[in-house]
Every structure is written in C-alpha cells, then in structure tokens.
Amino acid sequence: AGPLGGGDPAPAPKADQLVQYIVLRKDLWTCGGSGQGSGSGPQSAVPWPLGAVVAQGCHAATAAMWMSRDDSATKAYCDEGNINDMHKAVLEVKGETQLRNLSEKLDANGIKHKLWVEQPENEATCLATKPYLKDEVFPIMKKYNLCKTKIG
C-alpha cells in the first residue's frame, strides 16, 4: 500500500516487471527554472506550483503511452488485469540541459519516450518512456535520483 492505502511505499519493480520512467526537472519547483535552462523561452525565479509540475509529468506519460499504444509492452502494462498494478519510477534531473541530454541518450539507445516541451515557451519540462522491462532501461536511468521531495 502506498500513500493512498497507508503503510510503506510499494517495493521497487523487479527486473522482469514493466515500468514507465518519468523524469522531472527539479529546478522547476526549487527555482522556477531560473539559470538551468537552455536559454530559450522565458524563465522565472518563482518556483512552479505542485499542480503545474504534476501536470507536466501527466502530459509526458499520457503522450508516451498514446504514441506506443500498439506496442506489446504498453498493451500488457495497460491490460485490464494489470491496470491496478502499474509501476512508475519518477526521477529528477537538475534542469533543462540535463533533461535534453537524457532525451538524446535515450534516442541514441532506441528507448522510446516523449520529451514534453511546454509551448509557447519551447521549454522542455519532463520526459516519460513507454513501458519497458526494468532491465531494458535501468542501465541508462540508474544514475538519476528518485524524486523524493517532500510536500509541505
């Protein structure tokens, strides 16, 4: 049981479990993106509200799922028998440059994902992979920290 059911968080996915990775920019909630971006688009020193950051992750995750809707792993992940047993790993990077670099690395390794770029600012805010077996993506993602920021 996790935060909704009380008790300890769910255990980390096993190597043979499907997992969707979501990577958020930490600077969005710590300093509003100021000083961490690529220089394109207006950036504010005001931290983003929690809801706005969550929405960015939702946009990327939904887009990644839709773009891979015909993929067998995505179908299995969204199967009626698995719908209540989804595994996501939410990671963080320092800022936009690191996020764009990760996206390029995923592209180079054939890992399907969606880099969410907020418009009209043209600012990359997060990315999400399609569902993969943990072993397929973990070697690339292991250097990034889990997003563990506490609310309140």
Image (cartoon, rainbow, N blue to C red):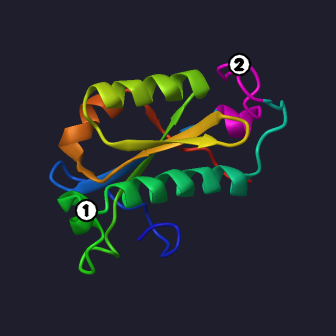
Is residue 89 at all visible to an observer of this figure?
yes
Q: Residue at x 55, y 41 (%)?
A: 126
Instruction: Tell me where the magenta segment starts and ends, as one range.
Output: 27-41
Report helix, strand or loop for mark 2: loop
Label 2, residues with CA under 10 Å away: few <14, some 14-19, many ≥20: few
* Picture disc at residue 122: none
Report helix, strand or loop for mark 1: loop
Estimate the x, y position of residue 99 in percent, counting from the top left. Answer: 51, 29
Please indicate whether residue 3 sits to the left or right of residue 36 in the image. left
Classify 108 as above or below 120.
Answer: above
Is residue 12 at all visible to an observer of this figure?
no
Q: Quadrant of residue 66?
A: bottom left
* Picture disc at residue 70: 1
Please indicate whether residue 47 sits to the left or right of residue 72 in the image. right
Residue 28 is inside the magenta segment: yes
User: Which of the two labelled residues, at mark 1 and mark 2, occupies the earlier sequence position?
Assistant: 2
Q: Residue at x 75, y 29 (%)?
A: 41
The disc labelled 1 sits on which kind of residue?
Answer: Asp
Label 1, residues with CA under 10 Å away: few <14, some 14-19, many ≥20: few
Mark toward the viewer: 1 or 2: 1
Label 1 close to label 2 by CB (< 8 Å): no
Classify 45 as above or below 87.
Answer: above
Q: Quadrant of residue 67?
A: bottom left
The disc labelled 2 sits on which kind of residue?
Answer: Gly
Residue 15 is inside the magenta segment: no
Q: Residue at x 34, y 31 (%)?
A: 106
Locate the N terminus and report the quarter of the image it occupies: bottom left
Count of numbered circles in the view? 2
Give the residue pinned by disc 2: 39
